[in-house]
Image (tube, grey):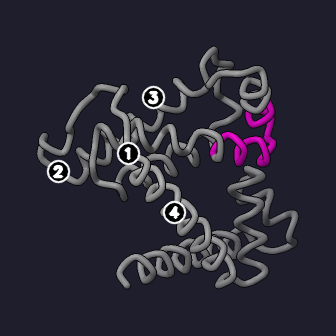
Amino acid sequence: MQTTRTTELWNCMRAGDPGALKELYNSFYHFLFSANFAVCTHRDIVKDSIHEAFLNIWINRDKLPPVSSVGGYLNACVRRKLIDALKKESLPEAALLSTDDEHEFSYEEVIIAFQEQEATSKTLKEALLQLTTKQKEAIQLRYFENKNYAEIAELLGCEQRTIYNRIYEAVERLRHYFSAKHTS
């Protein structure tokens, strides 16, 4: 799956382009889901591991190396997150079905995974609508533009403590919205 375009996207993402991160996510999501679902059949844990890996990559993008295989690097990041999640959840070793990356999924399983991704994307858009304009602005600056709290406070002309509170409240709203959607 490694192409010149993928390498360009990786380098653009490392330079701070959120569009490149989004394109990498969209390009590799199904591959990452399939490869890691072969290891752990807990769909939510696999999806969370993918999301956490991409969030971690974005946050640490300025420290990331150039890589020869973007897909391999991404899969290794997701696999580490998945293993950490399984340890944290104290799931039995039986949760790890196979480490064989050549497991193929049926057409139905791929369609289900795709529909789940679309549903998650829709839920995220709905969740963001629950935030105030100021919360959205703070989240954008913190997580997508990688500004620190002091920089955000200066940009928005308010106290740093206010920014902590806005981001905390926004994350709590998002968390509450997602948990309400996933329990219904």
At label 1, which amino acid type do we have?
Answer: Ser
Q: Which of the image's four quarters has the C terminus?
A: bottom left
Q: Is residue 180 above or below residue 16?
A: below
The residues bearing labels 1 and 2 have C-alpha atoms spaced at a distance of 29 Å
Q: Could you tell me if the residues under marks 1 and 4 are in contact, i.e. CB atoms within 8 Å?
A: no
The residues bearing labels 4 and 3 have C-alpha atoms spaced at a distance of 24 Å
Residue beneath disc 1: 106
Going 59% across and 39% down the picture, which residue do you hit? Answer: 28
Determine the secondary structure under disc 4.
Answer: helix
Residue 110, image x, y percentages = 45, 50
Horizontal arrangement in the rendering, residue 15 relative to residue 178 (left or right): right
Determine the secondary structure under disc 1.
Answer: loop
Going 51% across and 38% down the picture, which residue do you hit? Answer: 31
Q: Please tell me whether mark 2 or mark 4 is closer to you in this view.
A: 4
Residue 39, image x, y percentages = 29, 37
Tell me the tag on residue 90.
Answer: 2
User: Could you tell me what secondary structure mostly forms the magenta stretch?
Assistant: helix
